[in-house]
Image: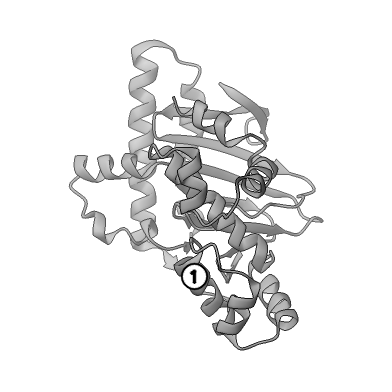
Amino acid sequence: MLKPQEFTLYNRPFPEIMIEKGIEILYFSDQKPGYFLLHSHDFIEVILVLEGDVAILAEGTRYNMNKGNIAIMPNGILHRTVADSKIRYERYVLHVELDYIKRLTEIFDIEIDRLSFLYEPNILECNQESIWRLISILSKIANTEERSGNVGSALLQCYTFELLITFLDIMNKGMKIKTTSKNSVVDQVVHFINDNFTDPSLDMEAITSEAFFSSGYLSRLFKSYTGTSIYNFLIQKRLDYSRELIREGKLITEAYLEAGFSDYTSYLKSFKKTYKETPKAYQDSLI
């Protein structure tokens, strides 16, 4: 049981639960939401909004979220949440590893190619019945944490399967919310960075030349749609990729160069600032 959080529905702490390897559930209720950093994950993130006025900025596209909406962010997608600080932001968050989803599709004979959320962001609108179906299952999972032994483990796995199958059912029945704000220039820049960020010569001048706009105008436009600067977006792409390479067994000296950094000092500084640990510490944590 980790990081107890206020669980308003039952007036008791609701933990972060690592149900089993590959999936965990969290609950947050922020009376005054703060600033959310740009980030990505090496797993699939699912956010069920219970309250709040929020938007998710994902690689140049803005998705406005309402109560009852579900956001599904695939692994590797840079995104950040923008929340109205005057309105409470309450949500459930699920972290699901891709291998866990694949195992589930094999058990229930689901065609994995039909699961679009594995490859691109999805925002779904749920009706009240679907919301309460999900909350009911999440509540059962929270209560099951108090059960020990084989019975508790079996119940957790059953409820987890029920939860994910319910999500898949909602995705089939739910309404996919269309993009609310997108800009062709920003989209072009994002794709250009995604295709070329491992090239150490890629810089602001090269990106500006690709878009045919002044650096000042392009910077303001880019930040309005992504919530961050072009430079930070580029650095974050390289950092995330370097961590992916380290997870795959690459040496740190190989990973930072293959990710597009030209010198170790700047890489180390950026890595520590972003992840609050050194590349070596991260590498050691994987053992």
Number of marks in the rendered image = 1
Taking 270 as reference, is 120 above or below it? Answer: below
Residue placed at 64% from the left, 55% from the top? 38
Q: Which residue is mark 1?
A: 177
Residue placed at 68% from the left, 29% from the top? 11
Location of the N terminus (image quadrant): top right
Q: Nearer the viewer, residue 284 or 32?
A: 284
Q: Percent x, y for residue 105?
A: 24, 46
Question: 10 Å neighbourhood of mark 1: few (<14), some, or many (≥20)?
Answer: some
Write down the quadrant of residue 189 in the picture: bottom right
**In this image, 58 relative to 107: left or right?**
right
Disc 1 residue type?
Ile
Residue furthest bottom in the image: 212
Q: Percent x, y for residue 131?
A: 50, 51
Residue placed at 79% from the left, 55% from the top? 85
**In this image, 21 relative to 226: left or right?**
left
Q: Is residue 42 visible?
A: no
Q: Nearer the viewer, residue 189 or 262?
A: 262
Taking 22 as reference, is 117 above or below it? Answer: below
Q: Is residue 164 visible?
A: yes
Q: Percent x, y for residue 282?
A: 54, 33
Write down the quadrant of residue 52 in the picture: bottom right
Q: Secondary structure at mark 1?
A: loop
